[in-house]
Amino acid sequence: MDAERPGRLVLAAGVVIALCIVGDSYLYSILPLEAPNLGIALPLVGVLLSANRLVRLISNTAASDLFARWGPRRPFVFATVLALLTTAAYALGRGFTVFLSARLGWGIAWSALRQGGYQAVWTGGLHQRGRLMGLLWGIIRLGSAASVVAGGYLRDRFGYHAGVYAIMGATVLALPLALAIRWPATPAASRRTAPVGQGNSGEAAAPRGGRSSPQWLTGLQELGRTSAGRQALLAGFIYAMVEGVLISTASLFLASRLGSGVLMAGLGARVGTVAGLVLAVRWTSDILFGPAIGALADRLGHSRTAVVLAAALLAGVIGVTQLSGVSLVLCLIAVFISSAGLTVTLGAIANGLAMAVAHPHHAVGAYTTATDAGSALGPPLAYSAGLLFGIGRLYIAGAVVLLTATLWYARASDRAD
């Protein structure tokens, strides 16, 4: 695979990651339904679904360091193998301890896979970054969407193990693809001239092949030197937290607002399919709209696009909480499209900031750690504050805070120009 063509490299890396993520996505829709049959107490399901996010608070830094020292090939292939082993554990294992080990292993694998995806995006120029980031996430989400829909259907028709064996078969295909990728011989970061804000350019020192700094705080410190870097980290954290709240409660909220005639009819054998379709709506939004929004952000400016998307998400959330029936569903679609666009746009912003510091691998690790912390906090917040004050109120509060954070970043970025 030609490493000199950024789109082809991003496509190849995205397909590998998509085939690896199917096991994780399958668990989100099926584990709550199958936990008793797998010897797992229902209250522990939340722990398992968050474990992979919590371990990434540590593994993101380790992955960044490995990519900086060894280059992308070996860590990316290792992560693919680890992803296959974790999916096999879902198929062959039983009990909380086995699944917890697998979830921790997946978190480590995801840190490296995502780092590889970001590094593939680096091979493109400044004016391609949004488009390439949209392509990457669109492919990854295609894997997630296919997993929850096909896996849920197979589980309903033939049982849990039929679904997970099919998922594991898909992940097996990722290994030869990962081995076939030809990564650039020189890190793209050494060729960068990326802005700290939205338009200013400047050279930054290329990362060395060795360990230039052993501190895990390197990326955080480098991003934190500018107001734009600090605000981007905050916006990424809040966005991931809001996203975690929305995804973890969407089916519950829809069931309560639309009634049994919409989501609960025929409940039982079809519950896996229904849960899969609910999650697939969010992930297919990345596929259908992510690349186009990324390309639009490249033209309009990333900070401006982030503000527009956050405002659209707030408007959609208000509609979701105030309307019913078809109008509610249309507003929810608007929320999902806006959320998909924010994933791409904030990721492109983080990449741009990383390109302007001395250790871009560590800077990306700092940003992804911030988003992982937010996504880990989202579900517990949803099922504590959301149930106490109302899920609808929590949706609105989160969207308001997110819009405020993107406005702060835009202001800091304008000052840096």
Image: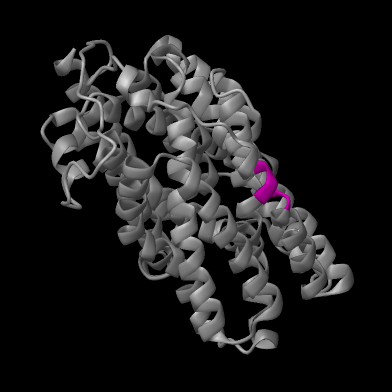
Horizontal side, residue 201 vs residue 107: left or right? left
The overriding secondary structure of the stretch rendered in magenta is helix
Residue at 62% of width from left, 43% of height from top?
179
Horizontal side, residue 331 vs residue 396: left or right? right
Residue at 84% of width from left, 64% of height from top?
154
**Which corner quadrant holds the C terminus?**
top left
Q: Quadrant of residue 62?
A: bottom left
Image: 321 above or below 327: below
**Colour approach in the figure:** one colour
Residue nearer the viewer, 301 or 262: 301
Image: 304 above or below 181: above
Q: Position of residue 241 (x, y in %)?
A: 37, 52
Q: Quadrant of residue 193?
A: top left
The residue stretch that appears in magenta: 173-177
Residue at 57% of width from left, 24% of height from top?
291
Q: Residue furthest right?
A: 157
Could one spot residue 414 in this view of the protein? Answer: yes
Residue at 16% of width from left, 51% of height from top?
215
**Which corner quadrant holds the N terminus?**
top right
